[in-house]
Amino acid sequence: MAEVEVLLLGSPQVRCGGWPVAFRTRKALALLAYLALEPGWQSCSGPRPARATDAAPCARA
């Protein structure tokens, strides 16, 4: 699996396997930056969010 680098100091840059990644919009880059900084989103081994049906039993059909 390729290593992903997110550089946020100065102008934001993203590299995957050493190659620069281009984004269509600045919003997409901003979302990636937010998720990279948000605790808990860096690894997939953390706790999973509950399903909506588990949180709201009245939503079941």
Image (spheres, helix red, strand yellow):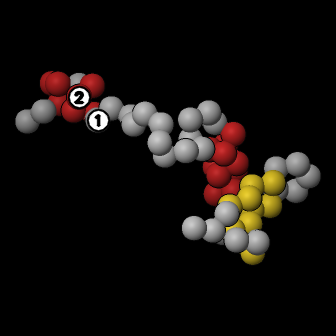
Q: Residue at x 21, y 32 (%)?
A: 53
Vertical comparison of 5 with 48: above or below: below
Quarter-wise, where is residue 23 in the image?
Answer: bottom right
| Quadrant in which the C terminus appears | top left
Please tell me whether mark 1 sits on a helix, a strand or a loop.
loop
Q: Residue at x 69, y 68 (%)?
A: 16
Residue 9 horizontal side relative to residue 29, left or right: right
Vertical comparison of 50 with 43: above or below: above
Outermost residue toward the right in this view: 10
Residue 61 horizontal side relative to residue 36, left or right: left
Residue 61 seen anywhere in this rendered image of the structure: yes
Give the percent coordinates (x, y) of residue 50: 33, 32
Q: Mark 1 Cα within 10 Å, few/some/many (few <14, many 20+)? A: few
The residues tagged by marks 2 and 1 sit, at their Cα atoms, a distance apart of: 5 Å
State the mark number for residue 54: 2
Q: Which residue is mark 1?
A: 51
Q: Residue at x 60, y 44 (%)?
A: 42
Viewer-proximal residue, 59 or 32? 32
